[in-house]
């Protein structure tokens, strides 16, 4: 099947579009990226998304309008990418849209009671004519799971090493990990959870400290010039989230703009300058990842595969290599996958499995009572033909 995967992450900086070819079934499933691109959000749109994630600024009319507006942006991006790939819309079977997360409500007990992703699938299907699968997290949450990290099931399907334990570590707005047993190990289950803030706190601190002149620490230049404050880092690592057992997930409701403001103010009160703050927050991400491995990895990890924007921060990657030694730290490119569009590929694979009536996760990954069929199907103009070709033939 030809499936277009759409992903807009916690950083809310744009939408990744990947045109994918997916075939087979678990055990023999194959997935390839035909073409991909990232379409950045305008500054105004990004600010409105981030405001809608902040309970002090968000309100229902703005979220409702964004729900429709973002879907239009998603649809336009799909059509632009198909044009670049020289593919007609009627040659695409499905669109898989993750949507933009506005709220992921994890209770103090660790249970997730709701997770809201916006980007109305009806608008996407109407504008493109392509059947769209969306709202992937809701069913897993209804079954008692965290609704995340959903990428972990696709990691399980595609990225196990024949005889080594691997950690698939994403560093987006939040960080998440999948500990994968080797394919030769038929007894050990995979483990997955959010490690904590990835780039979110760091990016928001950079924006605050530069008065908006920078939105992230490009190439780790600010962190490189700063000095790590060990005492403050230890206090940051005492946050209750890190101590909690898995399965667990988090988001901007815990590590968002309010937390970033408080953290920056506390650091300035200590006398730290901007570069020291960025250096320490960079170390916070690397350290919470390493701490999670020490606490929860079920076996020595031989290989760590990095994805997400954090892999482009050489200071963070250097810290990870030191903290995770002797594990080999690599990127998805080292194993033949495009890091930039891996998450968009994930949702293309999940849509493929949903369309074929197969579950899209494992209870061991999200804590759900059972594996669930994920997502909601919104028919496009191709719906009847797709049914005939894939189900009735």
Image (tube, rainbow, N blue to C red):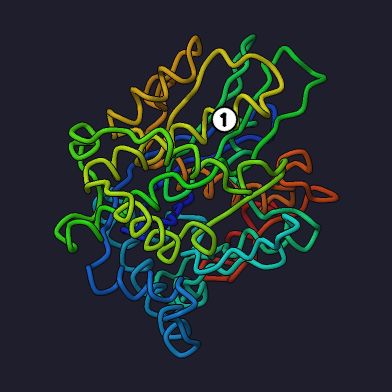
Decide which of 123, 195 is in the foreground and name it: 195
Q: Residue at x 66, y 47 (%)?
A: 353
Total marks in image: 1
Q: Which residue is mark 1?
A: 291
Residue 83, quarter of picture: bottom left
Q: Which percent across, then down, holds residue 328? A: 46, 13
Q: Residue at x 57, y 30 (%)?
A: 291
The single residue placed furthest to the bottom in the displayed view is: 61
Q: Which percent across, then down, holds residue 163? A: 64, 9
Residue 221, quarter of picture: top left
Please indicate, yes or no, whether residue 137 appears anywhere in the rendered image.
yes
Q: Is residue 260 left or right of residue 142?
A: left
Q: Is residue 211 left or right of residue 174?
A: left
Q: Which percent across, then down, holds residue 155? A: 59, 33
Q: Please say if 283 is above or below 73.
A: above
Q: Please say if 250 is above or below 189.
A: below
The single residue placed furthest to the right in the displayed view is: 369
Q: Residue at x 63, y 12 (%)?
A: 162
Please indicate, yes or no, whether residue 97 appears anywhere in the rendered image.
no
The single residue placed furthest to the left in the displayed view is: 213
Decide which of 205, 35 is in the foreground and name it: 205
Q: Residue at x 80, y 57 (%)?
A: 144
**SS at mark 1 in the image:** helix
Q: Residues within 10 Å of mark 1 (few under 14, many from 20)?
A: some
Q: Which percent across, then down, holds residue 50? A: 38, 69
Q: Is residue 235 left or right of residue 206?
A: right
Q: Please say if 279 is above or below 265.
A: above
């Amino acid at each position: 099947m030809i499936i277009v995967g759409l992903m807009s992450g916690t950083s809310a900086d744009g939408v990744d579009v990947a045109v994918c070819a997916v075939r087979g079934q678990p055990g023999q499933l194959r997935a390839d990226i035909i073409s991909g691109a990232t379409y950045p959000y305008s500054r105004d749109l990004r600010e409105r998304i981030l405001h809608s994630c902040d309970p002090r600024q968000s309100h229902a009319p703005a979220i409702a309008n964004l729900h429709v507006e973002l879907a239009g942006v998603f649809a336009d991006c799909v059509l632009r990418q198909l044009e670049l790939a020289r593919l007609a819309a009627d040659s695409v079977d499905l669109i898989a849209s993750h949507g933009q997360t506005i709220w992921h409500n994890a209770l103090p007990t660790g249970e997730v009671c709701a997770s809201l992703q916006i980007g109305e699938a009806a608008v996407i299907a109407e504008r493109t004519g392509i059947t769209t699968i969306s709202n992937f997290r809701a069913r897993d949450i209804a079954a008692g799971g965290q609704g995340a990290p959903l990428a972990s099931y696709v990691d399980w399907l595609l990225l196990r090493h024949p005889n080594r334990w691997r950690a698939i570590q994403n560093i987006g707005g939040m960080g998440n990990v999948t500990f994968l047993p080797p394919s030769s190990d038929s007894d050990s289950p995979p483990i997955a959870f959010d490690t904590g803030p990835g780039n979110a706190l760091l990016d928001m601190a950079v924006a605050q400290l530069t008065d908006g002149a920078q939105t992230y620490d490009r190439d780790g230049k600010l962190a490189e010039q700063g000095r790590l404050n060990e005492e403050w880092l230890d206090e940051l690592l005492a946050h209750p989230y890190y101590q909690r057992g898995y399965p667990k997930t988090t988001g901007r409701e815990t590590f968002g703009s309010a937390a970033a403001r408080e953290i920056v103010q506390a650091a300035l009160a200590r006398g730290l300058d901007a570069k020291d703050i960025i250096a320490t927050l960079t170390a916070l991400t690397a350290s919470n990842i390493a701490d999670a491995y020490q606490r929860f990895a079920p076996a020595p990890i031989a290989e760590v595969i990095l994805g997400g924007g954090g892999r482009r921060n050489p200071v963070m990657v250097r810290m990870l290599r030191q903290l995770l030694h002797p594990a080999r730290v690599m990127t998805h490119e080292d194993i033949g996958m495009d890091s930039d569009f891996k998450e968009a590929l994930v949702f293309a694979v999940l849509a493929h499995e949903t369309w074929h009536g197969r579950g899209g996760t494992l209870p061991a990954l999200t804590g759900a009572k059972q594996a669930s069929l994920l997502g909601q199907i919104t028919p496009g103009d191709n719906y009847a033909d797709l049914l005939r070709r894939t189900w009735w033939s």
